[in-house]
Amino acid sequence: MILFVLRTGSNSSTLREKLKSTSASFRFLNLYGKEVAVAWPDQEVENVKDESVEVVVKTKKSYVLAGNEWKKDPTIVKVRDVEIGGNKVVVAAGPCAVENEEQTLTVAKAVKKAGASLLRGGAFKPRTSPYSFQGLGEEGLKILRKASEETGLPVVSEILDSKDIEEFKRYADMVQIGARNSQNFTLLREVGKLGKPVLLKRGLGNTVEELLQSAEYILMEGNGSVVLCERGIRTFERSTRFTLDLGGMVAGKLMSHLPFCADPSHPAGKRELVHSLALASVAAGADMLLIEVHPRPEVALSDSEQQLTPDSFHLLMERIRALSHALGRSA
Ligand code: PEP
Ligand code: MN
């Protein structure tokens, strides 16, 4: 694959004509304030030259836009006024599922007070069993919006189906693609077109390279606001729910300019493990954390075992701040 980065303000029409005259596939898009063109396969276009082109990146990698061969500086993803990928460790917290207004408002106020920057809650839930609580759907998104208005916290929520895109456009500030949809390529393209920041989780059976290729689908639509998320993978280990692959996150950060989030809650599966995994994630360089908090975890309708109480989350935030400070960062 070849990436052509165009000179700012240049006219791309002659490059377009030259690419059209080959049998290559190509796509022009705007990303991070630059006009770029991706073309493939290489052998069809390797001799194409044009004065509008500033840099040519020829790569064997299948994720050129998400990769850092062309973009060396780390990408900062903005969710309203929250910046992910800078010096501050951004914490998103909230219930696994929005269950009702009171539960969501209670938890939103508690996580705001403790120092979280984003409210995360599920309205459409991807449950393994069809008999489990499936979420409140659009009603859940409206509750999140209300909680956002009351606390000022921007809202992150998971989309399951592109038929709901309009609701997410209206109510969400950041759209989560869950582990189970990490390779739903139709949904990735749709969310790319939506243009809102995306929290893209790694599939439980996917490699880091596959995660970057999933990100590529979103970037290819001209949406560069993608945060990658390590949420644990399936291994033979049974003492945790999933294996939090911090090595994969560290490697992924070297392969891409995109920021990384770590979700310690889902791999932990039990709340006793969440603090340690969250702190380990910060030590490993996570730009963002996603932590599940419920006012009464013992009666939660989903992921009851792993959600923290507001008090425990408050203590975790103190620990995250202390560690971030020691690392020359803030939280
Ligand atoms: C979630 O974030 O609540 C969730 C369902 O996560 P995952 O897709 O990582 O399982
Ligand atoms: Mn959950």
Image (cartoon, rainbow, N blue to C red):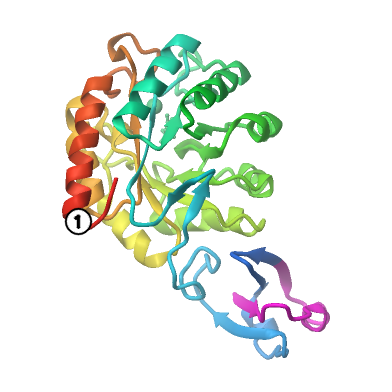
Where does the image place residue 178, in percent across and percent down from the top left? 48, 37
Quadrant containing ligand 2 reads top left
With 232 as the anchor, is 217 left or right in this view?
right
**Image location of residue 195, percent across then percent down:** 65, 48
- Report whether residue 100 is seen: no
What's the magenta region? 1-28
Q: Label 1 neighbourhood size at 10 Å, few (<14), some (14-19), many (20+)?
A: few
**Ligand 1 near label 1 (Cβ, under 8 Å)?**
no
Q: Which residue is mark 1?
A: 327
Q: Is residue 207 above or below residue 50?
A: above
| Residue 289, image x, y percentages | 34, 41
Q: In the image, is residue 25 part of the stretch drawn in magenta?
A: yes
Q: Quadrant of the C terminus?
A: top left
In the rendered structure, the answer to whether residue 23 lies left or right of residue 169 reads right
> Residue 54: within the magenta?
no
> 279 or 220, which is in the foreground?
279
Nearer-the-camera pick, 204 or 69: 69
Element type where label 1 sits in the image: loop
- Residue drawn at (74%, 81%), measured in percent from left and top? 10
At x 39% / y 26%, what residue is drawn? 94
Is residue 284 visible from the viewing direction of this image?
yes
